[in-house]
Image (cartoon, rainbow, N blue to C red):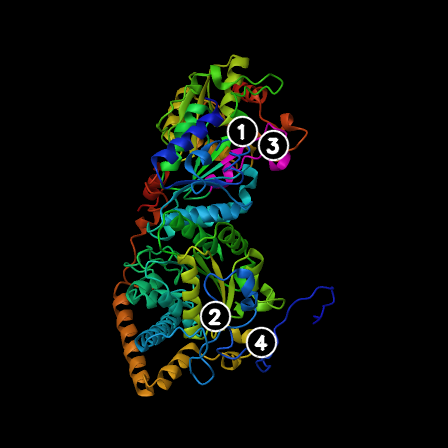
Amino acid sequence: MTYPRNDHGIHVPMPNARPGDSADFSHHAIPPAGSVPMPPVDVAPADIHGHAFTLIRVLDEDGNAVGPWNPGLSVETLRQGLRSMMLTRAYDARMVRVQRQGKTSFYMKCTGEEAVAVAAAMALDRGDMCFPTYRQQGLLVARDWPLVDMMNQVYSNSRDRLKGRQMPVFYSSREAGFFSISGNLGTQYSQSVGWAMGAAADGDPRIAAAWIGEGATAEGDFHHALTFASVYQAPVILNIVNNQWAISSFSGIAGGERTTFAARGLAFGIPALRADGNDFLAVHAVTSWAAQRARQGLGPTLIELFTYRAEGHSTSDDPSKYRPGSEAQAWPLGDPIERLKTHLINLGAWSQAEHDDLAKALDDEVRAAGKESESYGTLSGGDRPAPSTMFDDVYKDMPAHLVAQRSQAGL
Amino acid sequence: MNMIEAINSAMDVALERDRAVTIFGQDVGYFGGVFRATDGLQKKYGASRVFDAPITEGGIVAVAVGMGAYGKRPVVEIQFADYIYPAADQLISEAARMRYRTGGEWWSPITVRSPYGGGIYGGQTHSQSPEGIFTHVAGLKTVIPSNPYDAKGLLLAAIEDDDPVLFFEPKRLYNGPFDGHHDRPVRPWAKHPASEVPEGHYIVPLGKAAVAREGTAVTVLAYGTMVHVALAAAEDSGIDAEILDLRTLVPLDLEAIKASVQKTGRCVVIHEATRTCGFGAELAALVQEHCFFELEAPVERVTGWDTPYPHAFEWEYFPGPKRLAEAMRRTIEI
């Protein structure tokens, strides 16, 4: 295949469709669900190179679970997963509303990508440490972390454990195994490997998992992480969330035209899987497979989760300026919540009426949490952390020059 | 002990006392480091606690940050301070802010050791003094020893500290106290009082300066190699200078600086790094703020020039005793 060159002789990748065009995903080969074999966890990485170029899928177009990667989860687990994904979506919806009302400065939804975080959280142990990006709020939701605590962070209010210092959605919870989020992309990826190496050195059975966007794989830290993970065989799961868009730059700008993102693991000798990120069962299955490898001392796994960012990058973004408005609907792998719902209905374990009731109950839950959190203040009003706390935690003990500056600030 | 042996001894003691201490960096394992600072440590403590790292400074510091978050106490080596820039993001945006951005939930108890400064004809990539870039960053501590005793005690304090510490080692002082005259033979540390380094554990606390020479005519604020240049300048010129060895730049011992300048009424700041926005500018501003009414003369700065470190002209670039003595004299004659 050849690529067009522009007037200056370089090739600048362009997506198939822009605003006004019809969405076009015809260039993506989507193999049938159930068609990819599941190797034993101790497989030699070189023997599964093909897994980096295909797509592991469990749920077929009719919502049935098929093939060797079907994790055979209980109905209860599936319902739990559906609930966490729906709660994540309801939470996102409310927080965007409050951002529009001016109660916080900024928000980022994960619409369409709920399975990426929720299924992973459910496949990992509660003690495993997650090094997420800002679009894995589903990890906290699936680990039953209180929504009020998350909202307090978004509002930078008087109960914000981060004391009003971080951008909204840059959560941190040591207790929930959710590592502090950085605005500098990819930094957590190599840190996760360090955490995993520390655990391995202590004979600690816990493992680490990290997430990075496909755009951020261009960052140096992505390559640092793969080098260290490969060299020291760290017990870490390195996820690449390929949601097609890095703000307005499509995945081709990150090198997605040439090969898959999963293939980036191959040169490091790291086994690489490519999975349908909108398929709760597929994400659960590949995460479990990788977690078993890590726990058995077999080293890292790279997983590309093929998904689609159904909404804007953030509340500051207008995706209608750079992609067709119909693109999310045209995404060939559907919506993770709808697909799991259909699956449960096919199993006779769910109904549309139950679904509607649950959606309503979750909305009420989110609204109640919102009310409570707002009673502790928002960015635009009510209680805030004491401004004098601005000088705390720069160092463990406040040095003399900060004591002096705090007093100079009249705090 | 010479300074390299003292640094080695500090890490030996730290590894012995605390299982969480882990050392890695380029060539630090089997080989023991290009300057031999980690010599013998892998053999003694095993390759899972002292090991070679890939050549990726950003990765080394990032992995240290992650290990620190796990509960380890990583001590990493950046082979030359000039190579610390690829790790700048992990130091500045991550390690420095981890405690702050998490409200104290996580922190980075990491120590980053790195040989710095000129004197080995290393040109631009083996000679720089980047301390001023990092003293500007809230959340980092910066330590620069000038002798073997301090090097061991300060390094142990740095390793035991729960904040990220940059530990810059004056490579010119590794084997002996440099007297600022590049045409004289280097004397070994052996006959120097600071070479009396205890075998076991002790610390030199961060944030405490030392008086390297008492005097009344002018205060010289110095650290690292420049302490020795200042001592040579006082000896050569006969000026009764009081020389303060700052030892740590952040936290800084402002009280010691004030006490000395208020006594002498004069102050010259010396460092090897380039001048503009260097740490000397901060020192001069602090002295002006706190000692203005005791000052008899403007604060002078003697520094490296605002050029990259030149290969062939090290000794023209370098702020030696002659330049310092001239500055002290100008200050005194006002």
Q: Which amino acid, by three-letter code, is at mark 2?
A: Met
Label disc, if present, on residue B171 of the rendered structure: 1
Residue A94 part of the magenta-drawn span: no
The mark lying in front, picked from 1 and 2, is 2
> From this viewpoint, is residue B1 visible?
yes
Q: Determine whether the residue tagged by mark 4 lies in a helix, strand or loop.
A: loop
Give how far apart the Cα atoms at labels 2 and 4 are.
Answer: 22 Å
Q: Earlier in the sequence, mark 2 or mark 4?
A: 4
Q: Which residue is mark 2?
A: A38
Q: Name the residue at 52% across, 23% down.
A: B175
Residue B115, compared with residue A239, is above or below; it is above
Q: Nearer the viewer, residue B321 or A238?
A: A238
* Element marked by disc 1: helix
Q: Which mark is residue A28?
A: 4
Residues at marks 3 and 4, CA–CA distance in whole angstroms = 58 Å
In space, the residues marked 3 and 1 are separated at their CA atoms by: 20 Å
Distance Cα–Cα, label 3 vs label 2: 63 Å
